[in-house]
Image (cartoon, coloured by chain):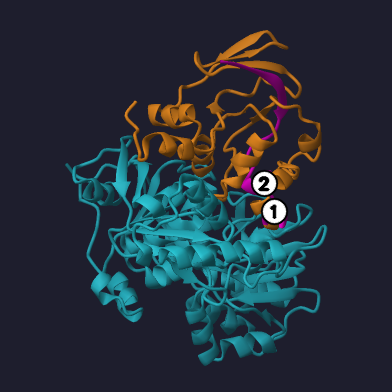
Chain colours: A orange, B cyan
Amino acid sequence: MILRGKAWKFGDSISTDHIAPGRYFHLRTNLPELAKHVLEDANPEFASQMAPGDFVVAGRNFGLGSSREHAPRIIKIAGANAVLAQSFARIFFRNSINVGLPVLEIDTSGIEQGDELEVDLGSGTVRNVTRDQTLTFAPLPPVMVKILNDGGLVEHFKKYGDFNLEA
Amino acid sequence: MSSTLAEKIISEHVGREVKPGEIVVTGVDVTALQDGTGPLAILQLEELGMVQAHKPEKTILFIDHAAPSPRKELSNAHMSLRDFAAKTGAVLSEINEGVCHQRLVESYASPGDILIGADSHTCTSGALAAFSTGMGSTDVGIGIATGKTWLKVPETLRVEITGTFARGVYAKDLILHLIGEIGADGATYMALEFTGPGAKAMTMSERFTLSNMAVEAGAKTGLFASDEATRAWLDEHGREEDFRELEADPNAEYTRTVQIDSGSLDPTVSAPHTVDNTMTAAAAAGTRVHQVFIGTCTNGRIEDLRIAADILRGRQRNPGTRLIVTPASRTVYMQAASEGLLADFAAAGALVTGPGCGACVGVHGGILGDGEVCMATQNRNFQGRLGNAEAFIWLGSPATAAATALAGEIVDPREYLR
């Protein structure tokens, strides 16, 4: 499947406090409301101006910090297709797969704000239409592909009633 | 084959020797949720029709992040945890009990356990030789209901500690220094293992401070071998039977070894807005501070409060610097009260709060104003962490924080020791 959208560029060390700020702690049981504030402290315009299908594109160690699964959930609820970053923090990465948000480790240094991207999850390539460049990303571990393809961990359990992680 | 501590604990659970990089499905011994992550976990279990706890007596629901509740949405979230506990027999840790990680090491985590908690600082219990790690709500929810989780067996980064701390230098200075050295992603997906004579000589309180911050280097957990100090801690908390000796094999293979001489360290601080942005307290001296916060799962134990009280006793905070002290748990609170520390803090001009996460998460109890600066003993100084993205957070030891409260600006605490 090819995902198409525009890049929203962020820097290094975007934390879960940037993505889902603690001052909205009370909205954690109201994710559509919380999603209106997604990434607010990194770019206040992102939530209101992004179009469904756009991509979050960032530098190193995206999602560091808290275990709050609300962070990838509200990126997904806001409508982002995927997150592309140089590297990810461990818990955020795992949470993203569990909630069915594709997270791609890729060299994002040549992608600029507003670039048109086409992401092919199957072949592991990102085409930067604006700059006429093609990048490849390392495939996800098979266990994560399985959970992602099932639509997240809850859907995986609905399907199998247990962990069924053989590739 | 020789195993690191992480490999050994996981191997015991899956019944065969595991190697780094392998994916395993394993049983879990202790599971934990808190009031920020718990309601979402419960929703997922409701959707799956799995409102159940595999081991209710080892499933703990902590109301600590917003305790007592500052608003009705959070009061309702607390109700969902109480309801889940009533339905499943899981243990409820109410608003008066304190921070989940402190409560877990006091009463629930044991050497050799695998513990998963929906809070990133779940790694704290690694100091008891438990493989303890933070995960999201869905992962922990599934762990609660089924008693299982999946793990990638981590590589291990060894931190070999020699020497003894100079006067005025503490475990917090060491862990901030380490994270400054290896970076906030220096141990991503790895386990940390703290070894060497310096680790062996540490008190449990010091070990908890180190393990607590393993995640700030990106690590999955931060382990210590269990020894007589571990046994004494468990004994002190009425759990002597939970002790077992556990250490890595002598020829275990480590991905990397970092050596730290405790004796070479100075009081260290992290500058805004990342934990690895470290420097000596002396280098930051003179930075005006509006609020000092002493507490949290990193540095809210009785030993931490004694260090702070020794500096603050009989003195007054700077009039321009607010001081908030939050004991990590009810047990710590009562001990501090009986030693007169809470009165010392109050006399010095501090606001002493009940036990809990307090100001650290930015929910309530010490939110900063625009442009304000805080010196905190917590583990994280990310932008927005104390409830305001326009504010600035520095991290330091309880001694650095207490001395800063007196001076009104960041100082090297050694000038204030008696």
Instruction: Residue A71: give x, y in percent of width and height.
Output: 62, 44
Indicate the secondary structure of the residue bearing disc 1. helix
Q: Is residue B401 above or below residue A30?
A: below
Residue B405 location, quadrant: bottom right
Residue hosting label 2: A31
- Tell me if mark 1 has few (under 14), some (14-19) or many (20+) residues whose alpha carbon lies within 10 angstroms of its own: some
Q: Chain of mark 1?
A: A
Q: Chain of mark 2?
A: A
- Which kind of residue does numbered mark 2 sit on? Leu
Up the image or down, B334 lies above or below B72; here it is below
Q: SS at mark 2?
A: helix
In front: B49, or B410? B49
Question: In the rendered image, which quarter is residue B392 located in?
Answer: bottom right
Magenta-colored stretch includes residue B106: no
Residue B53 vs residue A133, the one in the foreground: B53
For the residues bearing labels 1 and 2, Cβ distance under 8 angstroms = yes
Residue range of the region highlighted in magenta in the rendering: A1-25
In this rendering, would B230 be left or right of B349? left
Query: x and y percent of residue B371 in the render?
Result: 82, 58
Q: Quadrant of residue B189?
A: top left
Q: Residue at x 24, y 60 (%)?
A: B246
Q: Residue furthest top?
A: A132
Q: Is residue B208 above or below residue B254?
A: below
- The residue lying at 69 percent from left, 70 percent from top is B292
Say few, some or many: other residues with alpha carbon within 10 Å of mark 2 (under 14 / 14 to 19 / 20 or more).
some
Residue A16 is inside the magenta segment: yes
Inspect the image, locate mark 1, and give the three-letter code of the amino acid beneath it.
Leu
Q: According to the image, label 1 marks what residue?
A: A27
Where the C terminus of chain B falls, by quadrant?
A: bottom right
